[in-house]
Image (spheres, coloured by chain):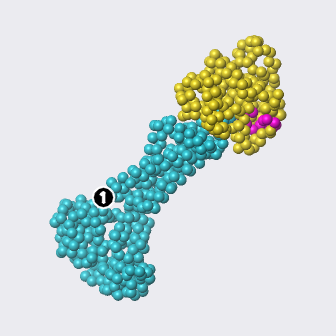
Amino acid sequence: MKSILTCQGITKNYGAGDIIEKVLKPVDLEFFEGQASVLIGPSGSGKTTLLSILGCLLAPSEGQLLIAEQGVNFSDKSSLTEVRRQKLGFIFQHAQLLPFLTIEENLAIVGRNAGLDETDIKQRLDNLLQRLELRAMRYKHPNQLSGGQRQRVAIARALLHRPSIVLADEPTAALDWQTGKTVVELLLEQARLEKAVLVVVTHDTRMLPLFDRILSIADGLLSEQQQTATTDNTFYTQS
Amino acid sequence: MASVVIAVSTKMLSHNRMRFVMTVTGIAIAFFLAAAQIGLLVGWVNTNSAIINNAGVDIWVMAKETRTIDYGTAIPRQRIQQVRSVEGVSWAEGMLVGWINWQHPEGKNITVEVIGLDTSNAGGPWKLIEGNLESMHLPKTVIVDELSKNALGVSQIGDSAEMQGKRATIGGFSQEVRTFTAAPFIFTSIKNALEYVPYYRDDEISYVLARIKPNTDILAVRDRVADEVSNVEVLTTAEFAVRSVKYWMLETGVGITVIITAVLGLLVGAVIMSQTLFAITQDHIGNYATLLALGFHQKTLRQIVLAQSITLGGLGIIVGLILFFLACNASARSPIPLETTTTVTTGLVAFSLLCCIASSWFSIRAIFKLDPVSVFHG
Ligand SMILES: Nc1ncnc2c1ncn2[C@@H]1O[C@H](COP(=O)(O)OP(=O)(O)OP(=O)(O)O)[C@@H](O)[C@H]1O
Ligand SMILES: [Mg+2]
């Protein structure tokens, strides 16, 4: 299996001197092509922090991040943008679509920014809108969509430029359980189709059986739990 | 990438039409306010030097240390002959300026500025709407501007009043010949003026106005006149205009006030324009953060913000400019006109565009200061 994303001894501290807060203790992790992981942990445990580092939005205090076996240079803003532009897709808690663009335009600008040609963009758009059952929404604006529909658009946007890594921070927190589950299932299905590494942060432990790997973080310490089974539904507990 | 910049910048603006219209209106008003203050200053400067600039002469000969055309003092009448005999001078005539009383028919006394003109009326009103310029050479006949009808208590040709205790009858009305002092201009012949102004002797005038022969060097003629005619100062028309304007502008409180108001107008306009544009970017700060996170380069965002500033600023400035030109037109016949020159207008537009570009620079800095992680917090 191809190694897509690697963390080597990554730590993150906030503050300085006496009031230093160690949010991440050394994290060593490797993600392989097509692998879907879920990241869980109590509030304030460092989930968003880790995801931000994986997404090249936040520099780690120590350690190395490798994407496609290439070290990421966190001191060069423009090369970070370049990595995000080509290799990463993001899904946020509130879809964060641009309200002044139609669904189609919201997707198209990501394709253009990534340097895809217009015919490719059109094909990807048609294909993703179909797969995510959004064809009727194409020319609508985000405020005309439901929360679940907006998250589906966010999934399409995250995948459009064929990133090798897709990161989602609590993509279902603003949705009801049924809608949220559908969104996560769609996300998993599409990411697997695209062979992208997927890391999803969630508070909802009922989602855990859907993923290949379960990463859990507490007090900045990352550990991996055994994924028991795809049929096992004993995770129906509230976090 | 141009297509992304255009799509995002125009859609961001057109999505909220109301906001768009308000922004353009805001910028237009800010531009107009600044332009109006500058226009007042230009109008004021033009008024200051209008008599000089409209006289159609090249050289002014005056008593030493004359600070403005309005405060001319007596020089002997024979200076006209002396100036005429200088090499390079083709023509010379006299002019007299004096300050005396005008008795309003209702009784109150006001101060007026009498301007006495020689045979060809050089230095006189350049636009007459009623009557005949030559009438001022009739005894006790004067020409005043239509703007001072009320102040002088006259309304038509033939009306008369007492000037310095002597009768003065209106022979005509000029137009747009303004004074910026409270004292209206009273145009008449030098001969008549000498009857009214008590502190001039019959052989005295205030200025000699001269024209030079074609293809002669004006500065050389000026210097020759200064050499050959004693006890006078000689200035070109441009020099005298500058001196008069400088006097009123810098040596009196009135001028300083006009300048300060103009500078304030410019500053306030600049601040409103920048603030209006800055607010648009601030409104979309979350969207810019999203774009940054999604891998849009800073350069692309910079272009988006700049494109918006130039679009909004440009439209606002065009609307403001139209308002300004309308106001210039509407005020042309008022005592305080708004005026402009091509240079001033170009300068104003350039300055305003610069403000818009500067504000986009500040907006962009605000975007780039964002904590990129903030995208995860919505
Ligand atoms: N910019 C920052 N400066 C200082 N401390 C920070 C900063 N960002 C996060 N922290 C701290 O780091 C810790 C981890 O924050 P993080 O946002 O990663 O938690 P989380 O696991 O995502 O929590 P939640 O589930 O509530 O979203 C928290 O204690 C937080 O206060
Ligand atoms: Mg978080």
The residue drawn where x is 79% and y is 32% is A4
Chain letter for the yellow part: A
Residue lying farthest to the left in this orientation = B158
Is B244 situated above or below B273?
below
Q: Where is residue A52 in the image (x, y as percent from the top left)?
A: 72, 33
Q: Position of residue B177 (x, y in %)?
A: 30, 65
Q: Is residue B306 left or right of residue A87?
A: left
**Residue type beneath disc 1:** Arg
Q: Is residue B212 left or right of residue A19?
A: left
Q: Mark 1 points at which residue?
A: B333
Q: Give the range drawn in magenta.
A: A54-69
Q: Which chain carries label 1?
A: B
Q: Is any atom of residue A27 visible in this view?
A: no
Is B291 situated above or below B71?
above
Q: Is residue A122 magenta?
A: no
Question: Quick check: is the Cβ at mark 1 less than 8 Å away from ligand 1?
Answer: no
Location of the C terminus of chain B (image quadrant)? top right
Is B79 situated above or below A67?
below
